[in-house]
Image: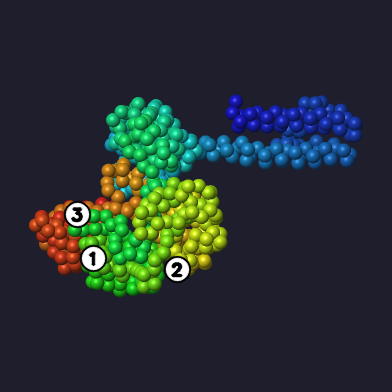
């Protein structure tokens, strides 16, 4: 018997006992104090009338003693109490249950992605799949969670992803990919069930502990993703290139074109200027295809958007052009600033960041609350004394790789108070914490949930990730609908939000694409934009 059933039985039994006791009391009071003999059945009728507030008519004329009045008052109060107790405990849940829509238990799909359990990173994955019109279904074991997702418009079925029958209900034999996004142990079990149901299905697992990767591969996983290590490496790459004019993690698009993220520093020549007035294109020949404004990504940024010290530009161009722009993003005070890089937090993210920094020109100083190999300073990163002991006043950057977002926000405030010029590069677990960290003073913030979702999507869709914290795609395509038109005539950017960053013509890559560039037959355009905008561009030029 379930707990709710036991509770209902106990409540009904208690109510029955209370009614019987009051009926006996009323019969006794009427005989002793009022001098009138009534049957137990008559007394029971009166008690039920009182408890249900239906009234009792002429019976009230028989009450003349205080004992009768006190008993009737007690019966009224008890009855009302039981009624109001019944409503929230039983009636309301029954009505809600009757009105709720149960999620389905099977679907009919093909060439789809199966997502086993739904997490915050799964939300990013779903957005990526939807932007490409890729069908998907979520297999969720928690009925209430599945019901909520279903009511919110997600494609979901209720079932245990470790159960072969549930995976078959998700049409795993016709699926393109299965993504296991649960705990490390459950993910391994999901892999085994998936390979039993459909040996040829591609299975991707996400792991929290990098040491379990080999077990997932042994179970049959085709790809194992450790987003924490990737996040640590990305944070470290920002620290190593934060003051150098050399490009760090630029992504090559062909032999001559690259995509890079450039953080604008305080007191740099670009700070405080609008995109329109920045002169980036004229001075460097690069194209701004996107920008983060305090954690809010826009592609393309508007002409009136103002570049500040927290802006991160996503730009395309030749290596020499990007290096010129990189110099414009650096401040004079930080350009020549040399010093250590501090890594606060030595979990998997912090360890990956420290490993990436080891062997570079900026070996890290590691802070952690636990005294273990690899830790240089034992202490709390929110304590000014710990930061000073680690040398933050002479450091150029601090990478906050802490496990708790609230602690990271406070550590950012403390770091900026102790060393205002230090560059704070922070990890966030939830995307909701990103704006807070920027307001606290962090120069660069990367959310674990966003990185995880993007990496899962890129693996599921078999696409290269330009940057794991944005949805920018690079498309090479012919554009018959634009032949004979200049870019200003076609008005591509205003109509699709996409940026044409280069064109391949007669085997040559043309990167300086201005408004007067005219598209010719057999031109291959290189286009940058977020997923949904790329779809609009394809519709425009086809």
323 on left or right of 150: left
> Which of pointers 1 and 3 lies earlier in the amino acid sequence?
3
> Which of pointers 2 and 3 lies earlier in the amino acid sequence?
3
Disc 2 to disc 1, C-alpha distance? 28 Å
Find residue 413 and report its horizontal and vertical position in percent: 51, 63
Q: Is residue 326 above or below residue 225?
A: below
Q: Give the SS element for disc 2.
A: loop
Disc 1 to disc 3, C-alpha distance? 15 Å
**Quadrant where the N terminus is found in the figure:** top right
Q: Give the SS element for disc 1.
A: helix
The answer to whether the residue labelled 1 contacts the one labelled 3, judged by CB atoms less than 8 Å apart, is: no
Q: Nearer the viewer, residue 181 or 30?
A: 181
Q: Give the SS element for disc 3.
A: loop
Location of mark 1 (residue): 321
Location of mark 2 (residue): 421
Find residue 451 and report its horizontal and vertical position in percent: 38, 50
Q: Is residue 377 above or below residue 274?
A: above
477 on left or right of 6: left
**Residue 308 appearing in the image:** no
Location of mark 3 (residue): 254
Image quarter for residue 307? bottom left
Question: Which residue sits at x=29%, y=43%?
Answer: 461
């Amino acid at each position: 018997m379930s707990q709710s059933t036991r509770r209902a039985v106990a409540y009904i039994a208690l109510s029955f006992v209370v009614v019987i006791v009051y009926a006996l009391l009323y019969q006794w009071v009427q005989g002793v104090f009022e001098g009138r003999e009534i049957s137990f059945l008559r007394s029971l009728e009166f008690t039920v009338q009182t408890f249900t507030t239906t009234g009792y008519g002429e019976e009230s004329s028989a009450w003349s003693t205080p004992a009768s009045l006190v008993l009737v008052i007690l019966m009224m109060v008890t009855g009302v109490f039981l009624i109001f107790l019944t409503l929230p405990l039983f009636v309301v849940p029954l009505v809600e249950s009757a009105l709720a829509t149960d999620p389905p238990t099977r679907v009919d799909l093909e060439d789809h992605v199966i997502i086993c359990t739904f997490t915050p990173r799964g939300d990013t994955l779903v957005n990526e799949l939807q932007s490409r019109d890729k069908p998907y279904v979520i297999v969720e074991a928690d009925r209430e969670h599945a019901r909520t997702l279903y009511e919110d418009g997600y494609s979901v079925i209720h079932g245990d992803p470790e159960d072969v029958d549930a995976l078959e209900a998700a049409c795993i034999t016709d699926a393109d990919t299965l993504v296991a996004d649960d705990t490390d142990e459950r993910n391994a079990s999901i892999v085994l069930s998936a390979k039993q149901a459909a040996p040829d299905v591609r299975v991707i697992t996400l792991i929290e502990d990098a040491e379990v990767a080999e077990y997932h591969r042994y179970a049959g996983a085709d790809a194992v993703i450790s987003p924490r290590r990737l996040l640590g490496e990305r944070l470290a790459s920002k620290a190593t290139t934060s003051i150098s004019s050399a490009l760090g993690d630029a992504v090559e698009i062909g032999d001559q074109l690259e995509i890079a993220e450039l953080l604008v520093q305080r007191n740099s020549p670009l700070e405080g200027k609008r995109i329109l007035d920045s002169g980036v294109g004229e001075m460097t020949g690069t194209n701004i295809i996107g920008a983060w404004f305090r954690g809010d990504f826009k592609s393309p940024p508007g002409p009136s958007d103002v570049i500040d010290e927290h802006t991160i530009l996503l730009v395309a161009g030749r290596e020499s052009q990007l290096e010129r722009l990189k110099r414009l993003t650096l401040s004079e005070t930080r350009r020549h600033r040399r010093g250590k890089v501090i890594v606060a937090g030595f979990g998997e993210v912090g360890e990956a960041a420290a490993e990436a920094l080891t062997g570079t020109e900026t070996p890290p100083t590691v802070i952690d609350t636990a005294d273990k190999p690899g830790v240089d300073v034992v202490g709390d990163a929110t304590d000014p004394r710990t930061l000073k002991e680690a040398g933050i006043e002479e450091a150029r950057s601090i990478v906050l790789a802490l496990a708790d977002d609230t602690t990271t926000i406070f550590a950012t405030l403390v770091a900026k108070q102790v060393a205002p010029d230090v560059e704070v590069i922070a990890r966030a677990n939830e995307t909701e914490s990103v704006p807070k960290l920027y307001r606290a003073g962090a120069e660069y913030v990367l959310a674990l949930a966003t990185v995880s979702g993007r990496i899962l999507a890129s693996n599921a869709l078999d696409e290269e990730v330009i940057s794991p914290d944005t949805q920018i795609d690079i498309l090479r395509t012919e554009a018959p609908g634009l032949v004979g038109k200049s870019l200003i005539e076609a008005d591509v950017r205003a109509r699709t939000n996409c940026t044409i960053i280069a064109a391949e013509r007669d085997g040559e890559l043309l990167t300086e694409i201005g408004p007067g560039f005219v598209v010719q037959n057999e031109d291959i355009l290189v286009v940058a934009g977020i997923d949904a905008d790329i779809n609009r561009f394809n519709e425009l030029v086809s």
